[in-house]
Amino acid sequence: MSTYNPISALVIFGILVFLAYMLFRPHKGWFWLIRKSTGSRDKIVVEDILKLMYHNENKDHLMNVSDIVRNVNNRESLVVKCIHNMVELKLIDIDGEVLKLTQLGSDYALRIVRAHRLWEKFLAEKTGFKEEEWHRLAEQKEHELTPNEADLLASRLGNPQFDPHGDPIPTNTGKIAEIDGISLSNLEEDTMGRIVHIKDKPDVIYRQILAENIHIGSIIRVVEKNESRVVFHSEGEAFILAPIIAANITVNVLAKDAVLEDQLARLSILNAGEHGEIIGISREIRGDARRRLLDLGFVKGAEVSIDLLNPLGDPTAFLIKGTSIALRKDQASKILIKKKEHGS
């Protein structure tokens, strides 16, 4: 026959009270954290679906449930559940097998696109993250920014119209600027243009463009185009792209006499013994990095030459305004010069 032990009972009661507290304490209890995590997960999936549908509808590509399940990186059951909830919330309509954004859904999608592109602009202007990281980080942050926080961020950035890739940033009222230009793959031979947009999707093509050091704002001239390649000159260098890659670059056509393309070169192609005059700094260098280069003397009109070559190839020391400044090739490729005869 067991006997009642008040001390053991008190210990068990204390453990139960502690577990109940840990489970249900306001805001931080396990129950609330799990509930909040589930709600946050559903919200992210809903917003991913809205953004996916928005981009596809802008290309006149309507989607069905299978398309969305295949393209949203999450469990099929969760995606289907979110689609059902979105229909009930009147974010999307179903027409047979086709799903379409309602006006409410389109407005919501634009808010997510706005948050994403503003955050990419912030990463480009205010941080040291590499360009290939911007999209991934913005995909996370777009779900966290409230409309008010997005407005504050836009104001801090000077209410930009375009993100670092040249994509238009929607205003808080849903207005969105047009991308004016044509695909590089459609540019005719001996035609000049300025790069105004580089698509960041699909990722594999975007990374190839980055690896080629092709920049927004660069002036180009197509010298050859056929079914297998597009060849163009830009800032003293020749580039060869497959048409499928060139199709992800948008350019504004320039008049042939609008600019003397052959006078522009990248500092990275300057050879030992040559001299150049600084023409400007590419738009690809922004924020603190741009200010640092200007403070170091890389200003328009300054003369520059190679001071010391690195046996390993990178970095190179450049002589500017009597000071030797070491730059990596990636940095030097974003500084534009005009080659000149020494003493001219």
Image (spheres, rainbow, N blue to C red):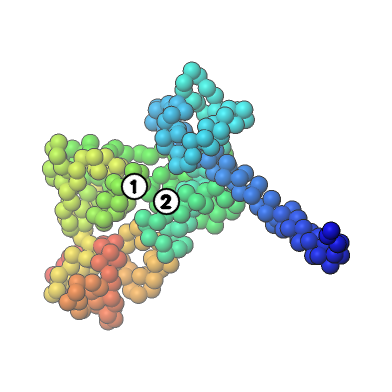
- Extreme residue in the top direction: 96
Picture quadrant of residue 215 = bottom left
Q: Residues within 10 Å of mark 2 (few under 14, many from 20)?
A: some
| Spot occupied by residue 301 in the image (x, y as percentages of width and height) | 28, 68
- Circles 2 and 1, Cβ within 8 Å, touching? The answer is yes
Viewer-proximal residue, 161 or 11? 11
Depicted 70 relative to depicted 335: above or below: above
- In front of the other: 248 or 170: 248
Which disc, if any, is residue 203?
A: 1
Query: In the rendering, which numbered label is found on residue 135?
Result: 2
Instruction: Specify the amino acid type for callout 1.
Output: Asp
- Against 76, residue 139 (above or below) is below
Q: Residue at x 27, y 50 (%)?
A: 209
Residue appearing at x 45%, y 58% in the figure: 123
Does residue 159 appear left or right of residue 24 in this picture? left
Residue at the image point whose x is 61% and y is 45% from the top: 38
Q: Is residue 71 left or right of residue 244?
A: right
> Of residues 14 and 116, which is closer to you in this image?
14
| Tag of residue 42 | none
Instruction: Report the Cα–Cα distance between label 2 and label 1.
Output: 9 Å
Depicted 171 relative to depicted 327: above or below: above
Neighbor class of circle 1 (other Cα within 10 Å; few <14, some 14-19, many 20+) is: few
Query: Residue 140: x and y, percent?
Result: 50, 51
Residue 336 on image: x %, y %: 26, 62
- Quarter of the image where the N terminus is located: bottom right
